[in-house]
Amino acid sequence: MKSNQFLRISIRAACAWCLFSVTGYLFARPIMSGLTPIMESMIEQMQSDYVAHLSIIDRHGNPQIIMSCTALRRFALPSGQIIPFLGTVDCAYMDAVHALVPMVIFLVAVVAWPARDRTEVRKRIMLAALILPCVVGLAAPMVLVGLEHRGRNPDLYGGGGGEMTALLQPFAFMEMGGRWLFPVLGAVLSIQLASMNWTRAARV
């Protein structure tokens, strides 16, 4: 890659990052409200202990995603509180702006990388529209499920209670940087597929 091309990509990436970051910061509440059905569906696919309901509320001056859990079986919290069948409790929360960062990373990468022509741009936009819901469905929901499960099983995550459960392993991966890796991989997939000659690939 030539130095001038690298400079152009860097400038485009910086401009896109500023644009998407400001947009996410200003409109975090409506954006996340629109995405809650996708996230709720993904959360219910990840586990079978409860039905999740997500709401966006202001907390400490910032919009927060609050997850309420309606129990599908009786379980106990570390505090000793018993949640009965169909009982509801606020079980996890995360910052709404922070939850948008994987989307920003994905969009910046897709926009900043140069395309050969308008056809490739159109294909990239279509692919990004298909892959972006996957990024949304894997990042914040997995973190929320992990936070809830860690709250009920703090010893497992802390290493004092035996082997980490299947629900906490993806959460630990996300906490160690996986939530940033998913959007990058999704962007690379969008860019690579858009650059292919689909007609030639179909003939092969």
Image (cartoon, rainbow, N blue to C red):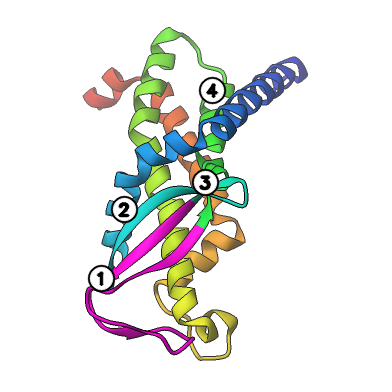
- Residue to which mark 4 is pinned: 111
Position of residue 198 relative to residue 94, above or below, is above
Magenta-colored stretch includes residue 53:
no
Residue type indicated by callout 2: Glu
Secondary structure type for disc 4: helix
Q: Distance between the residues labelled 1 and 2?
A: 13 Å
Which quarter of the image is occupied by the C terminus?
A: top left
Foreground disc of the pair 4, 1:
1
- Residue to which mark 2 is pinned: 40
**Which residue is at the front of the view, 176 or 44?**
44
Residue 96: give its label: 3
Residue type indicated by callout 3: Ala
Secondary structure type for disc 1: loop
Labels in figure, total: 4
Q: How far apart are marks 3 and 2 (CA)?
A: 15 Å
Secondary structure type for disc 3: helix
Of labels 4 and 1, earlier in sequence is 1
How crowded pointer 3 is (Cα within 10 Å; few <14, some 14-19, many 20+) is rated as: many
Q: Distance between the residues labelled 3 and 1?
A: 25 Å
How crowded pointer 4 is (Cα within 10 Å; few <14, some 14-19, many 20+) is rated as: many
Which residues fall within the magenta stretch? 65-93
